[in-house]
Amino acid sequence: MVGGGQLARMTHEAGIPLGIRFKLLSDTPQDSAAQVVSDVVIGDYRDLATLRAFAQGCDVVTFDHEHVPAEHLRALEADGVVIRPGVEALLHAQDKGVMRERLWKAGVPCPRHRIVTDPEDVARFAEEEGDGDGYPVVLKTVRGGYDGKGVWVVRGAAEAAEPFRAGVPVLAEEMVDFARELAANVVRSPHGQAVAYPVVESIQVNGVCDTVIAPAPGLSEELSGQAQEMALKIAAELGVVGHLAVELFETRDGRLLVNELAMRPHNSGHWTQDGAVTSQFANHVRAVLDLPLGDPRPRAPWTVMTNVLGGDYPDMYAAYLHCMARDPALKIHMYGKDVKPGRKVGHVNTYGDDLADVRERGRHAADYLRGTITE
Amino acid sequence: MVGGGQLARMTHEAGIPLGIRFKLLSDTPQDSAAQVVSDVVIGDYRDLATLRAFAQGCDVVTFDHEHVPAEHLRALEADGVVIRPGVEALLHAQDKGVMRERLWKAGVPCPRHRIVTDPEDVARFAEEEGDGDGYPVVLKTVRGGYDGKGVWVVRGAAEAAEPFRAGVPVLAEEMVDFARELAANVVRSPHGQAVAYPVVESIQVNGVCDTVIAPAPGLSEELSGQAQEMALKIAAELGVVGHLAVELFETRDGRLLVNELAMRPHNSGHWTQDGAVTSQFANHVRAVLDLPLGDPRPRAPWTVMTNVLGGDYPDMYAAYLHCMARDPALKIHMYGKDVKPGRKVGHVNTYGDDLADVRERGRHAADYLRGTITE
């Protein structure tokens, strides 16, 4: 796996029981995954020679993030390295412009959008596509964004200069009047088997995922089926191998629009570690190795994932004592990262029959671990 | 953790989500746990200097097996190393003679027993303690046995020479007329918190654990409570820290007798990985670090663990394909060991509402992975 973040860490964890020999390419020995994996190569994923040396002896190469340059992926594929998902699929997770164009052509409902060239072009987009005065408009750099970074909401051409400064193409999108955000997680293997997890509700705070509720409360069977079918269709159309997260807007008038794609295990699927028969990480491993996929069904009526962000207390030991003693059924997943304010340093999963209780337990633990509450 | 076997491998796996920095002392880099752990020291656990160097920088030292010499453990404790379970407790898992004497004094029901000096003494033991002609008698070397090794069932003094050849003291025990074998698994922390898992039935084949059923079918609440209380009492009496497995005989007349003790995660607790809210491995880690313990309750009406023994086929890839495709809910746990006939190379967990079905799924997978069946 290329990339030493928490997704690689948890993928290794899921691969251990399957007897998988996991090899990691990590920036530093302190990276989240590098702390727990035996076979670690320290190197820069932006360097083709490093990638080539790393890929030696790997049956399959897969990814913790979308940042490996496409030209390097093509070079590795030309060398005969098995890359899953393959570069043609990955392009759609690396470049929001390519993704939008492809989904639009495939008839997948998306927000109205087009590539814009400068603030004046943003004004034209607002005029053509927006309601009322056309604003707000959402601007995104097509590459490199995550957790709200690389995304701006602008209310006029005067605010639209910033996104163009990075020198990366900018995509303008209508501001969708959504009721809530959902995510449809599916896993697809090279021989075409696919499984769909229950559709979840994803609650963002300041552009960062805060809480995921599985299944999405009150979602009609019809919309749930639509979301799963949409994700399975995208996986098949794009030739995705491994885990695919499709982030969706549920509009106030009951439609689904695709927001983002991720072709790797995803924050909206972390609940599966304790809430599904087979976790997204185990199924990602099974898919990229072309093993039959595991059962994606839920193990409890409700499972809630709550992200733990870094707070003002670098030492979490006292918080551990409190959280574990208060809730012996709490499932803690920490990433081994240094605590910095606002950084995702872990998550907690809770499950049970009573959604309000399950949410409260997760909320309390996450707030306590962050230091927001100290009762 | 000292020892690179599958118990260390699975303890590391369980420590990853807790953010535990796991350090391993392993005989070779190929050992089961050494394949998956980042921080591995290769060395001999029988060498005190090696142990001392390994213990540097560890908050706590715990064990994958009972074979570290007691005098080394005492030396480490004298150095100020925190060893859990401590040497005074561990002695009872290392030496069956010490264990029997201590349990007997504490009033814990055990088979009749005493240390014997030679085959003539075995004949005297049979005469004093046995029914009828006194045979069969069970002979055990007090140290070094596992999986039926170091245990003999003899039907006369003429058969009793072999156990004395190793030069290790020999314990004679009555042959218990048991209905079945049970195991009571508990975990205890330094500050005295303890949790008890449901009592399980353990089915042995040729002296090796084959199947564990959780909970033990048809076990009365009274006997189940007795078994749990007995294990909690032993843990407290002996000052055990970490996981304690108490292997029990359920006699035909409805009594419980203690067979063996193990002070570490144990084969009879592997079902907890997929069948309990908190696995034995996670709770062992929490206990030795003096963190509050996790909920030991079951997640399904029935969970069955079936051991996978090595068979005639060293390559399990084709068997993987079959087993995963046949049963998408099967939970496979492989140890990364070379396949040798009869060697424990992994286990499978199955769970559900229908015990017969849950057992059949585990049996089929284990037989298929071994190569006993190839349909």
Image: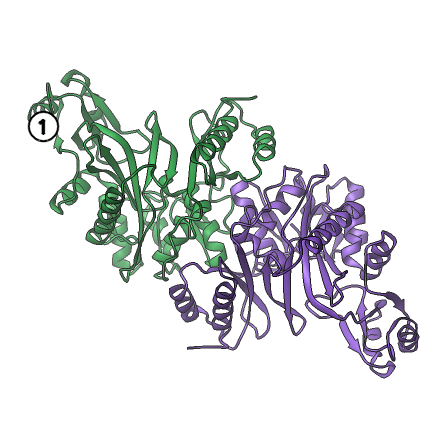
Chain colours: A green, B purple
Q: Position of residue A340 (x, y in %)?
A: 46, 27
In the picture, measured across the screen, residue A29 lies left or right of residue B4, that is: left
Residue at image position (85%, 81%) is: B156
Query: Residue extending furthest top?
Result: A158
Amino acid type at image mark 1: Glu
Residue B27 shows in this picture: no
Foreground residue among B94 and B137: B137
Left or right, A135 with reference to B201 = left
Q: Where is residue B176 shown, x and y percent of the image?
A: 78, 69
What residue appears at the point 53 percent right and 44 percent down from the top-left corner? B16
Q: Callout 1: helix, strand or loop?
A: helix
Residue at mark 1: chain: A
Above/below status of A65 relative to B132: above
Depicted A77 relative to depicted B21: above or below: below
Mark 1 sits on what residue? A129
Q: Where does the image place residue A363, in percent across and percent down from the top left?
A: 46, 29
Q: Nearer the viewer, residue B153 or A2?
A: B153
Residue A66 sits in quarter: top left
Q: Does the image show residue A259?
A: yes
Instruction: Please name the residue shown 53% across and 53% down the image.
Output: B275
User: Against A105, is A202 above or below?
Assistant: above
- The crowding category of the residue bearing disc 1, from other C-alpha atoms within 10 Å (few below 14, some 14 to 19, many at least 20), is some
Disc tally is 1
The C terminus of chain B - image quarter: bottom left
Nearest the viewer among A287 and A162 is A287
Front residue of A363 and A368: A363
